[in-house]
Amino acid sequence: MIRRCTSALGLLLLVTACGAVRLVPPEEMRAQPRNLDFEGGTYAGAVPNGWYVGRGPRAGTPDQYSYRLDHGVRHTGRSSLLISVAAERPRGHGGLGQCLYQPEGERRRVRLSGYVKTSGVGGDGASLYIVATDDRRKGFAFQNMAGRRARGTSTWTRHAVEIHVGEDAVQLCFGFFLEGPGSAWVDDLSLRTSTDASR
């Protein structure tokens, strides 16, 4: 069973990979990222600990994509994350993400990098993403691998996305998604933040 988020008083906002806003319980928000190397086990039998399954207007339904740790294919360590299409003609994208609290009043540059491998990926392909927003759903910064998404069949390749986070940002969300047929692996993610004095 895949964990879902429900609307209730006090829920925090989340911007998904395609810019759609949904609500996330405060307990799903944290100060530091978790399980970026996918070595930390799973919940519900499939989803890596520390990660949630993305939802939004362009997200596929639970029967469209499958998620699991792959112990036979990995960049380093014991496992990687594998997202595979589970429907003959998938609709939308399938992805996993995390959300972090962000301290207000500081401009930052945030970079997400990691290693991606693909097999028979078509459609819009596989991509890392990162997004920041304020508590009014305004002024968000968003970046994915548009124009350079991983497609076809490829060996482990390092990719990165980067955004400038404004002073009003209160949350940062990041992750990985597949949009189209095929299978995509991701491993050894890194999230780095530095003070942005250029803006």
Image (tube, rainbow, N blue to C red):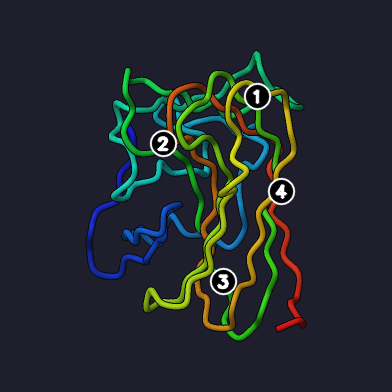
Disc with the residue nearer the chain's start (3 vs 4):
3
Label 1 Cα neighbours within 10 Å, binned few <14 / some 14-19 / many ≥20: many
Report, in whole angstroms, how far the alpha carbon at label 3 lies from the one at label 4: 17 Å
Determine which residue is flagged by label 4: 190
Determine which residue is flagged by label 1: 79
Q: Are marks 3 and 4 in contact (CB under 8 Å)?
A: no
Report, in whole angstroms, how far the alpha carbon at label 1 lies from the one at label 4: 16 Å
Who is closer to the viewer here, 30 or 36? 36
Disc with the residue nearer the chain's start (1 vs 2):
1
Label 2 Cα neighbours within 10 Å, binned few <14 / some 14-19 / many ≥20: many
Q: Quadrant of residue 158?
A: top right
Report, in whole angstroms, how far the alpha carbon at label 2 lies from the one at label 3: 25 Å
Disc with the residue nearer the chain's start (3 vs 1):
1
Determine which residue is flagged by label 2: 94
Label 4 Cα neighbours within 10 Å, binned few <14 / some 14-19 / many ≥20: some
Q: Quadrant of the C terminus?
A: bottom right
Disc with the residue nearer the chain's start (2 vs 3):
2
Q: Are marks 3 and 1 in contact (CB under 8 Å)?
A: no
Residue at coordinates 70% horizontally, 36% vertically from top-left? 115
Who is closer to the viewer here, 33 or 143? 143
Question: Is residue 52 toward the left or the right of residue 92 in the image?
Answer: right
Q: Secondary structure at mark 2?
A: strand
**What is the x, y in percent for residue 72?**
65, 13
**Which three-letter amino acid code belongs to the residue tagged 3?**
Gln
Give residue 102's mark.
3
